[in-house]
Image (cartoon, rainbow, N blue to C red):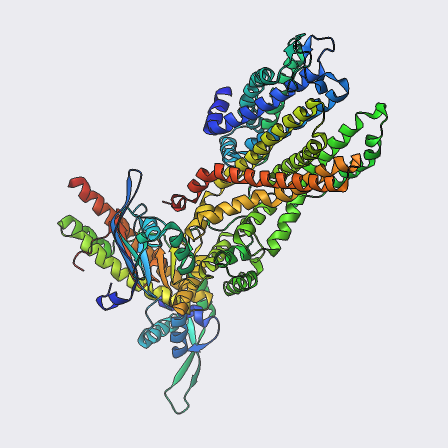
Amino acid sequence: MAIGHVLLGILERGPAHGYDLKRTHDERFPSAKPLAFGQVYAGLAKLASDGLVEVAETQQEGGPERTTYAITPAGVETLESWLAAMESAGPYPADELVRKTITSLLRGADTTAFLQRQRATHLAVMRELVASQADVTNAAASIAIDHSISHLDADLRWLETAAERVAADRTRTA
Amino acid sequence: MFALAWTMARAGGWARSALLAGCTAAVSGLLLVAVALIFISDSADEQVASFVRDGGTRGGVVFAVLLLTLPPLLLLDQAVRLGSAHRGRRLAALRVAGATPSEVRRLGAIEVGIPTSVGAVLGIGVFAVLRGLLGGREYDPETLDGSNFAVVPTSGAPSLWQVAVVAVVAVVGTFVGWWASRAVVNSPLGVTRRRSQRPPRPWGFVLLLLAAALTPTALSVNHDTDFVPFVVIALIVLALVVLAPWVAYVIAKRLARRTDRPASLLAAQRIIAEPGAAGRAAAAIGGIGLVSGGVVGFILDVRGNEDSSYMAGAILVAISLLVGLLVAAGSMAVHSVESLLDRRREVAFLAASGMLESELELAARREITMVALPLASVGSALGAATLPVIGGGPLAESIVAIVLGVGITVTLVWLASAFAVRAVRPWARRAASPLNLRTE
Amino acid sequence: MNEDRMDEVLLDSQSVHKSFGRTEALRGASLSVAAGEVVAVTGPSGSGKSTLLLCAAGVLRPESGRVTYAGQDLDELGEAERSRLRRRDFGLVLQFGQLVPEMSAVQNVALPLLLDRHDKASSFTAARGWLERLDALDLADARPGEMSGGESQRIAIARALVSGPRVIFADEPTGALDTVNSERVLQVLLEVSRETSASLVLVTHDNRVAAVADREVILRDGSNELRVGA
């Protein structure tokens, strides 16, 4: 439902058609994957069937049909209750990175090499994010990138600590 | 309480305690000499210098001895400040740990009070040494004239007065320690150093005006006002001490605007930030210049005089001046050490970013000479001019006196600054070490 | 480092050993930097990052190993020559505590030029220019004690850049700053390095800072981390 709520948030500022919604979404979340048109229209259809948005206007001037959507009072209510509900702070499920690291460590394989390659991969993404941070000018976009950077940074620091623990473990057993 | 204070004093390092004790010993010894001079009995069977035996000039000798306590007092003041940033942090840590303001004050009092009390008692030893070197001899009809160097009377028995002097010095020392820890007491987070101080104000001019107003009386030959010249000199000395930080500030401000020499700029800015230390030392040096100029004039005047006791007096004064100058330079050295210890990281950074050791030393030297040299020149010129002008001597002689007085004083001050910088070199090297840049 | 860039190496430290008392800070660490290159030196605390930076910058003399700059072996230079080299060709930025507390911001920035015998007027004009560039002209007459951490760090950077260094050494330049201030400080360092083709050596434990570098050198226990299978 996350995309639906984001669409409601955009529509609350004024009616918009599918293409506008996609563009605004991508501007708001520059570090996220760009929305596909299919996702936008599927989301809108679901919102419309729930009575949260309605068709405001349909235009057809030579080109393909362009439908403009508007948020309904029920839609505003749903948006507000979504924002009022606090996100849980975890526990996070073990993701692929953790699974791989632990497995490689317990297998007795060269975890150091794995951790080094992983750090390089993470740092490469970090490099792109930091560069895009320098390019954006509006606060909302910066904040969205900040979130990705912070998570990436947490992973990088976790990788560093893991590397140190592996090194310490090796000197202890050696 | 006492055990804690003792631990704190040891954490402050023996050097500071030794310096405190040494200065206090010098002050207390000199005060004991002054007391002995005041209570000399006219009927004593003792041969002393004629200017000590003569009731008319004895007052001047007492006054000179009191003036001599100024340089060690200055050094004492600087020594109390030595490590104040560290001590401030230590006392502040105690405050955070729950010590009450009065307990912290008491700790500060004990920390300074112990070495100064020890020094006050050691002053008896200083007195004994001075007595041995410069004491009067027992009456001997063979050599009727007392030694010209016998200025310390030995006849008087140990009196209650001497005990009182030692006690007062110890109490004052303890009070200074109590006073110095006031700042920490106000804020448990420690003294906020490095905040710019308020520029000093030239209040000392009021004292100078007062001295000027009294000068006609001082120069009159009326015997009822014999004490007034001393009042005038005391006022001038006090004015110099009060004015010195302001003079230091003004000179440094001017120089900082004009100079393009980094060493001078650094020195000037340090003085502007803290004009007190440079000013006080310069005041002492200026005072020494005043007297030494006078002595040069005096020596030129009494050359060839039959009564050799004048020459002896002048030599004694000259030696005292030299010691005083060294002590004043020493107080600047102590101040330099203090500021180096306090800014190790900044000094190390200056060295790391390419400032040569010689340039850093030059800055330290300029910090001393920038204010001290002008004050010493003016002081010695005034001192050297006084006697010929009052005595109405020939113009040529006045000029010779001034040139010689200023020349000798300036050379001595320059040598003293070189000595101070040389004495500080080990600390300067340690401060400039890149080890102070390491954070891990 | 890329093989085809080896010929433009500006700064080269090889197998550097340095001890402090009984602590061996560096055991054969190496760092080479090409002209205009931005290199991050990372690693756990105590791994010798700062020591390596100070050795490469000719501040510390290593016990063994070779440190060269523009082909010149720094060990062959006397203390005064090393000082002059640091003054003219290097700019040094630390985490904190590098400004002379008694001097105003503009005086602090002008100091390296004055040390290099530039005349007063041109030194202060250049210093003001750098302060303006760093949005700190309004701080020109403030003393370090009257500034915030971010402000004094910008002054420190202006001072490091004023002499037009060919290498900028920065040891945790953003270590004491919040995210927004550190972004700003980092941005200026990068811009200047790009404009003047100055090399930039960043010692850091912050991944954001490491991410702006062209290349990362990781230290562990005083030597370079062994690249396994890379």
Asked if residue C39 lies left or right of residue C91, the reply is left
- Relative to residue B314, is residue A116 drawn left or right? left
Q: Quadrant of the N terminus of chain A?
A: bottom left
Residue A37 % position (x, y): 33, 77
Q: Which one is nearer the viewer's eye here, A121 or B252?
A: B252
Picture quarter containing residue B31?
A: top right
Q: What is the x, y in percent for residue B225?
A: 83, 25
Quadrant in which residue C25 is drawn: top left
Is residue B69 at least partly visible in the picture? no
Q: Residue at x 66, y 48 (%)?
A: B250
| The furthest residue to the bottom | A62
**Where is residue B401, by image quadrant?**
top right
- Relative to C42, say whether B320 is above or below: above
In-image side of B166 versus B387 (left or right):
left
Q: On the picture, is B26 further left or further right than B224? A: left
Instruction: Relative to B9, say whether C209 is above or below.
Output: below
Marks counted in the figure total 0
* Residue C133 appears in the rendering: yes
The residue closer to the viewer here, B315 or A11, is B315
Q: Quadrant of the C terminus of chain A?
A: top left
Where residue A165 appears, x then y in whole percent?
24, 46
Residue B430 percent across, percent down from the top left: 42, 40
Along the line of sight, which residue is nearer the eye, C188 or C193?
C193
Residue at 54% x, 21% y is B114
